[in-house]
């Protein structure tokens, strides 16, 4: 689980990114989840756009994407989902460490 500080950091990192996947009328499917998982392994942080013609509720889509790719839902703003998953081989993002009190 990400802390609030880590999520803020990731939101700032994701700000300049453009969505590389779109969820449309068909909703979330297995092939899309596999492609997003591969992209997360390469990039760690990415945006997914939910199109206006998507028939599912945006919160359900965001949860399905995060759960289906075993990633963290960083943010859902408007129709844009930001996902983060630490890469096994391409670690680029170094999160602020968690201070235990």
Image (cartoon, rainbow, N blue to C red):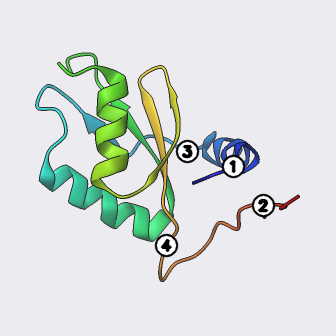
Q: Earlier in the sequence, mark 2 or mark 3?
A: 3
Which residue does the numbered mark 2 point to in the structure image? 98
State how many labels appear. Answer: 4
Which quadrant does the N terminus fall into?
Answer: bottom right
Q: Residues within 10 Å of mark 2 (few under 14, many from 20)?
A: few
Q: Earlier in the sequence, mark 2 or mark 4?
A: 4
| Residue 17: mark in rendering | 3
- Which is closer to the viewer, label 3 or label 1? 1
At 37% from the left edge and 62% from the top edge, which residue is drawn?
Answer: 39
- Which is closer to the viewer, label 2 or label 3? 2
Q: Secondary structure at mark 2?
A: loop
- Which is closer to the viewer, label 2 or label 4? 2
**The image quarter in which residue 69 lies:** bottom left
Describe residue 54's horizontal placement relative to residue 2 as left or right: left
Q: Earlier in the sequence, mark 4 or mark 1?
A: 1
Which residue does the numbered mark 1 point to in the structure image? 3
At 33% from the left edge and 49% from the top edge, which residue is drawn?
Answer: 67
Furthest residue toward bottom: 89
User: Of 65 and 25, which appears nearest the observer?
Assistant: 65
Q: Secondary structure at mark 3?
A: loop
At 62% from the left edge and 71% from the top edge, which residue is drawn?
Answer: 92
Q: Position of residue 60 (x, y in %)?
A: 30, 29
Furthest residue toward right: 101
Q: Secondary structure at mark 1?
A: loop
Q: Earlier in the sequence, mark 3 or mark 4?
A: 3
Q: Earlier in the sequence, mark 1 or mark 2?
A: 1
- Which is closer to the viewer, label 3 or label 4? 4
**The image quarter in which residue 100 lies:** bottom right
Do the numbered discs 1 and 2 sit on residues whose CB atoms are within 8 Å?
A: yes
| Residue 87: mark in rendering | 4
Q: Position of residue 5 (x, y in %)?
A: 76, 46
Q: Residues within 10 Å of mark 1 (few under 14, many from 20)?
A: few
């Amino acid at each position: 689980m990400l802390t609030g500080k880590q999520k803020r950091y990731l939101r700032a990192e994701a700000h300049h990114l453009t969505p590389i996947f779109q969820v449309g009328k068909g909703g979330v499917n297995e092939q899309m989840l596999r492609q997003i998982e591969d992209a997360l392994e390469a990039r760690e942080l990415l945006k997914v756009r939910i199109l206006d013609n998507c028939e599912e509720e945006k919160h359900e889509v965001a949860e399905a994407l995060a759960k289906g790719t075993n990633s963290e839902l960083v943010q859902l703003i408007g129709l844009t989902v930001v996902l983060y998953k630490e890469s096994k081989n391409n670690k680029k993002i170094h999160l602020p460490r968690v201070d235990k009190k």
